[in-house]
Amino acid sequence: MKIVIVSILALGFAAGGAVAAPAGGDPVRGKQLYYDHGCYGCHGYGGQTGAWNLVGTSSPIVNNAQAFLFFLRQRGGFSPMIPSLAMPRFSEAALPDAQALDIQAYIKTFKLDAPDVDSIPLMGQIEASAAKSYDPGK
Amino acid sequence: MSNDAGARELGRRAFLKGAATGTAAMATAAPGLAEARARTDEAAAPEAAVAAPPPNASQIARELSASPPASLTPLVTRPGSDLMVEVLKQMGVEFAAANPGSSFEALQESIVNYGDKPNTMPEFITCLHEETAVDMASGYGRAEGKPMVALLHGTLGLQHAAMAIYQAYYGGTPMLIIAGRDDGFIQAHTADDMAAMVRSFTKWDAHPKTLPEALAALQEGYRQATTAPTGPVVVVLDTEVQKEEAGDFAVPAYRPPVIAGLDAAAARRLAERLINAKNPRINVGRLRTPQGVRQAVQLAELIGASTSSQATVGPMSFPNRHASCGPGAATDYDFTLGLEIGPADVALMGPTIASIAATRDKMGVAFGGLRAKPSPPTAPLAPMAVKIGETIGLDAEASLPGLIAAVQILLTAERRDAIAKRAALTAAANRKANVEGVRKALTVKRTGWNSSPVSLARIYAELWPLIENEDWCLASPSVLSGSHHRELWAHNKPYSYLGLPPAGGIGYGAGACAGAGLAARERGRIIINIQTDGDMNYAPGALWTEAHHGLPVLSIMHNNRAWHQELMFLTFMAGARGRGTDRAHIGSTLRNPFIDYRKMAEAYGVAGEGPIEDPALLRAAFKRGIASVKAGRPYLIDVITQPR
């Protein structure tokens, strides 16, 4: 899936060479927009839980303004016949470029919170538990 | 109906007509005067049958407990409802859950008063909604593999409960539904064919006309509910039958169902294939009872087969941390037996609810997934095609005793040695796979470990060391909270996880957990309920039932303040149409105001705490909750969570 998305982005950039480099957004405004437009719904309040992790990735979708805008505008112009949990389209009418870049700026403030498995005693307990075989006779 | 009973009925109808003529006066009279006048009207009433009237003031007053009923018939000394309770005792029915209703007042009175140990086997369980009563029967039935009773009041109770019955039907959940019917009382509460309202989504129903027929129907209903395909059954009991004098009529002995399994010759042929395989495997689906699970374990141990389990997705499957459970030392299985599941070279597959759906659905409703035509390819929960070489259409659990006996006959000392060596290799490989699997899962689930609001993976992770050495049951559906237990927890009991709402209907979880709590209370078990907020708000009165009956249910709110899946669906829809994704929250969130679940629990008499947003506080809260439920007191912890 990632490969397909990156390919689409590459084609988009090639076709849309006239797109001006957008200015950076405001993370403070972006925080409210991230909530209002339901981004948290799939990505979590900190971009680390749920369907798609936004933190600790080198994806241009997160890190490049043009790629981010291009990605948001895809998947439109059709009528979904079955409910979908896929990434929605965010049209320019619903989410102007400036606001989208505010959201991107906010996403960039997210910090990776993934402690090493061996550093958390609780995780060690869970691992140790997995090594125990169940004996129904006991 | 006996002649005597008929005469009593006529007298009662005459009373009702007389009461109707006094309606206007009674409406304004004081209660004492109204009662006296009703009795006067009764004496003056002509002995004639009457057309069915709408409920009058007297009837409604009685329904609302504003005035006692007039005594019209001689007191019976051995009411039919006492014998009904005897039958329930014989069959080992532990509980009867109900929201009270006049159409089963006689049976309720017998349950709570009859016998050497009144209100025991069954114990009357008070529910605040009929949907909860049936969902409780679902939770209990899925945990124990046997029915309890849900008592429902006439047309109203059945309709309140219909959605829960529907889910039980999809889930093949055994339960005995008793619908009271009082044809001489409030007419809107009765019907000629009461069970027809739910016939298309119940396995079997009966409307007996006499007491002997009623007792036989209860027994047959229990047999039907517990015979594959297991499912909900309905027995409609007329109030006259519940109240009639039984005299010296003897309660018939209960005969358990005889469920067909493999015959001896077929069992031997299958045993030979298992014994002769160099790398046999047994895939285990959902069996009917804990006894079936024990027998599946016995067979796997005898053969030294590797096994697979569905215990992380539902009840009555193989213990998933048993030494045999996992891929084994090699995956070149040369013979695979399926027990109610594929893939397999040979699968024992008993009848399913889908196999009887057409015969029950006389109205042609054609419920999705159960109808004859295939499901649309877009349907996410449509059954997937699974490769099965030979399907034997016999109940796997009923076949296991014969199969085990046949294997035991074929086991030689030489074979036992080879099997022991194979089992040891399998155990080592599976143990390694388990550890690697958990570590891999943790490396994913650790992301957002310290998030506030709390990550759902953290909730499941924090819980496991605290419950690992307890007898626990995860009774709540888990898919919306990420199903993190599947990788992190061991599912070694038939009731470790009770699975999804069988028809995907929200509102099931709270009641099902309370029902599982009934089974747990008697058995030193605790119930874990990761409770979604949307589900809780359909029938939160389940909390009161937990408090009232001392059910050991630990509810941990997955409080994302939304019907969150719908919010995501709506966001996608708005986006596809190029319109405002910032308005998708309308109608799909629980904001303005937020709901305080600790206070909700407190109002229903359940201790609790929260809301908790800091994950560092979870462990101590969970410890308090577990201590509470182990002492027989339900507990609720409100946790503000990440959405998913």
Image (cartoon, coloured by chain):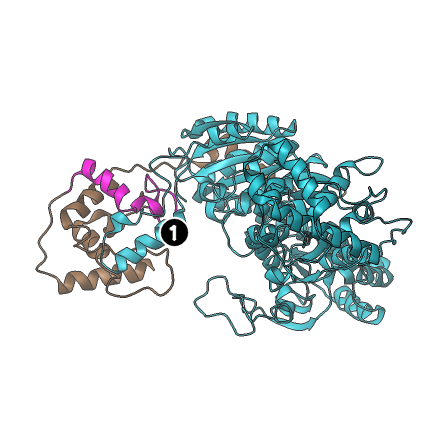
Chain colours: A brown, B cyan
Q: Which residues are magenta?
A: A25-53
Q: Seen in the image, is A99 located left or right of residue B262?
A: left
From the viewer's perspective, tell me whether residue B8 is left or right of residue B431: right
Q: How would you rate the neighbour count of disc 1 (Cα within 10 Å): few for under 14, some for 14-19, many for 20 or more?
A: some
- Direction front: furthest residue: B44
Taking the magenta stretch, the answer to whether it contains residue B60 is no
Q: Quadrant of residue B520?
A: top right
Q: Is residue A92 visible?
A: yes
Q: Position of residue B1 (x, y in %)?
A: 80, 59
Residue B553 coordinates in the image, percent (x, y): 60, 35
Q: Position of residue B477 (x, y in %)?
A: 54, 47
Q: Nearer the viewer, residue B550 or B277?
A: B550
**Of the residues shown, which amino acid type is indicated by label 1?**
Glu
Residue B475 visible in the shown view: no
Check if residue A35 falls in the magenta segment: yes
**Side of B631 relative to A93 (left or right):** right
